[in-house]
Image (cartoon, rainbow, N blue to C red):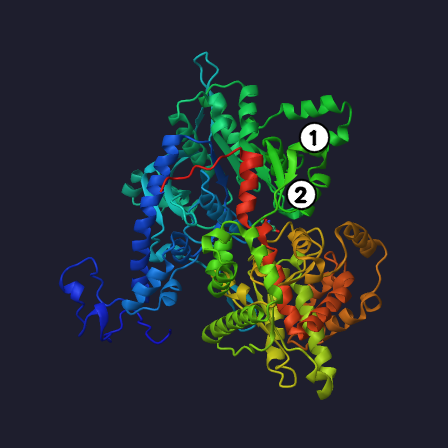
Amino acid sequence: SGKEKWPRGEEEVWKSGLRGVDGVNEYQAEGSVLNWGLVDDFGAYQAASLSVRDNLIVNWNETQLHYTKKSPKRAYYLSLEFLMGRTLDNAILNLGLKDQYTESMQKLGFNFEDLLAQERDAALGNGGLGRLAACYLDSGASQELPLWGYGLRYKYGIFQQLISPEGNQLEAPDPWLDNQNPWELPRLDVTYEVQFYGHSERLNDGTGRAVWTGGQEVLAVAYDVMIPGCYTKNTNNLRLWESKPKRGFDLNSFNAGDYERAIESSNSAAAITSVLYPNDHTFWTAASLSDILRRFKNIGKPISAFPDYVAIQLNDTHPTLAIPELMRILLDEEEVSWDDAWTIVTNTFFYTNHTVLPEALEKWPVPLMEHLLPRYFLQAVEKKYPGDRERLGRMSLIEEGFPKQVRMAFLACIGSRKVNGVAELHSELVKTTILKDFVEFEGAGKFSNVTNGITPRRWLDQCNPELSALISKTLKLEKPVWLKDLYKLEGLLKFADDKAFRQEWGAIKQRNKERLAHLVQTTLGFTVNTNAMFDVQIKRLHEYKRQTLNILGVIHRYLNLKKMSAAEKKKVNPRVVFFAGKAAPGYYIAKLTIRLIVNVARVINADPETKDLLSLYFLPDYSVSLAEVLIPASDISQHISTAGTEASGTSNMKFCLNGGLLVGTVDGANIEIAEEVGESNVFFFGHLAPAVEDLRYQHVYHPVPIEEKCPALANVLNQVSGGLFGDGGAYEPLLNTIRQGDYYLLSDDFDSYMAALDLVDEAYKDRDEWIKKSIKTTAKMGKFSSDRAINEYAESYWNLESAKVPA
Ligand code: GL9
């Protein structure tokens, strides 16, 4: 409500209800558990969370006992990132307790939505890959699958983004745990010793066994995060490891007065899980595997049965060290022969590739795992292709050079039972580019596709409660029924022709736009025109995602508006463009794009001739929670990567699920979305993936000046250089990426991009038709539920069956 805000420590007393009068809380006086003193929103959020947690713990405990008793095959999702966002709302929705909580908190004098906003995001991830992991956990629990996540408990999540007055991105730490985290259970009883660095040494006892020695000893302490399923008792576990020094500090140095030295190694141990993306992944894979192995051993089966009880999914190559680590355990600790160990390993692991961009393919120094690499792999290749030295070089796990490096994607590939990409086109590209030789060598059967999905619980029910309620009412279905079988949305199709329904649909979109406008007003102080079309691009800043194309398009539109007569302007459809996203701190060109966006916004939003028709906002510090407000408010969203570069994209699915239309290239999951909703309901543009290589070749060997090739774009670039948006020279490095080489093909796609946006304007004029498109889009999004995706993994990959906890 905003009215009854109760800043912490304020002396004023709320005059009624349970919080007592005259500054004395009745419950405080009685010494009850509600002994909080004056309770503000944050305190009430904490109290509500603890009471929800009580429910969760019971379910979580029963679920773990049930799995232990039944010993089903289990799957483990190993990921360095879990971008969970907030938990309270998600938990009470999944428990079916939202109405009760809203009502009770109101009786206590609180607006529940304000309380929800008190929670800090758990932002243990960078972007789509980490959010995908979070959606899969939600679906695993909802589908009652024995699926656990393993990751790291970073003390600091992804950096907070600030924007300086000049428009530069600044980074600040995200100490998200400072307020305590009610959603995790510290498990001091689950700790492992991990030896960092060190080496394997043969024992001299004639057995041929080896032990790992040397290095620094670090403790891995488990924190369990409860993952409630939707309307089920099944509450799965996400186990996050915290690193801790094993021996406290070094007493000798301490006694000698060298305090810095005394705490040095204890600090370096704690640093491992300090910030998102440490560079050493050994720690965590070692702890996770010990944990998985211990659980397996409790079943009492021989080690050869390991793959019958355990499936491990690698979320990209980041956790690939689990492969050599399991080899080490099997060889050195379980005394299994090399061949048998390799059989176990290759039946346990599964590898998902999330990008074909060459610069994103991980390479690691050889010495880290020298002794554990399957060396005979190349011998096998040699045997199959005698004398083909070139192929041998291409396929080697080790890239020659200084230092020698391990190609992690290759290791993940040969160490896994199956390999998949994350959308049809991407999986095809994996097979025909980066892993082509491996397809030839191992057979195509090992490689397949699982198109990504998103959880409709968070990305519809939670973020768009009005639309969710309208859907339940219209389909005459209880919420969990269609939320757990998203294909049921097709039932909405026939209502596209129902005028009253369309009106309700449109009114909800309008209110969601107002909700976003309210947020912008209260946080940034800008008044957003809610009668305009809302056009949104939110994602990590990256050249391949082409936010630059978008902002240059906005400038083009602005320049056109400036040329128009008053009569022409009357026909123009007002538009508000939103950007949000973080740039990697060291990614200079991406940061320059942010700077350009911010400065274009400053000029355009202040221009009295055009500002009612075109305005632009860069919303700082993009997060899961911000996405939950932006996505339901969009009329269109942009997914405009150079064809073949965006493996899948998942926000495209979220926008469409909420009835936003898609402007995009023929790339990633855009293609499958269009297949579902029909091409007439998306706005496609740009060159296709097979043309990209040729175009790049042309740029280099037969360059055509941009003035000739795309005059409209050349004009925009000149305006920027000329200083229309402040110091033109500052943008030169960014503009030159387009003028020279234009690796991401902006000059090739600019004209068709602008044409697509014109079609959007045309279509938006017929509001009734537009809403029909919107309804049809939502109705056809069934395929993109992460429930569908997780079931594909469970059935075709892990051979995993559901294990429902009895009610
Ligand atoms: C990504 C791809 O770029 C996306 O297209 C894809 O949707 C997701 C999930 O499969 O994975 N791969 C990748 O490295 N990131 C992705 O988003 N990057 C980040 O998460 C920052």
Write down the residue under mark 2.
427
Taking depth in this image into account, of 253 and 745 the one nearest to the observer is: 745
> Dividing the picture into quarters, in which one does residue 603 lie?
bottom right
Quadrant showing the C terminus: top left
Q: Is residue 496 above or below residue 674?
A: below
Q: Judge: label 2 CB < 8 Å from ligand 1.
A: no
- Classify 10 Å Cα crowding around label 2: few (below 14), some (14-19), many (20 and above): many
Q: Residue at x 29, y 54 (%)?
A: 51
Q: Position of residue 448 (x, y in %)?
A: 65, 38
Q: Residue at x 42, y 28 (%)?
A: 296
Q: CA distance from mark 2 to mark 1?
A: 15 Å
Q: Position of residue 151 (x, y in %)?
A: 46, 43
> Dividing the picture into quarters, in which one does residue 730 lie?
bottom right
> Dividing the picture into quarters, in which one does residue 40 lie?
bottom left
The reply to whether residue 76 is in sight is yes
Q: Position of residue 336 (x, y in %)?
A: 50, 19
Label 2 sits on a secondary structure element that is helix
Mark positioned earlier in the residue sequence (2 or 1): 2
Taking depth in this image into account, of 40 and 279 the one nearest to the observer is: 40
In the drawing, does residue 290 fall left or right of residue 592? left
* Residue 417 - label: none
Taking depth in this image into account, of 149 and 452 the one nearest to the observer is: 452
Q: Position of residue 203 (x, y in %)?
A: 44, 18
* Residue 443 - label: 1
Furthest residue to the top?
206
Label 1 sits on a secondary structure element that is loop
Q: Is residue 427 above or below residue 110?
A: above
Amino acid type of disc 1? Answer: Gly
Taking depth in this image into account, of 447 and 801 the one nearest to the observer is: 801
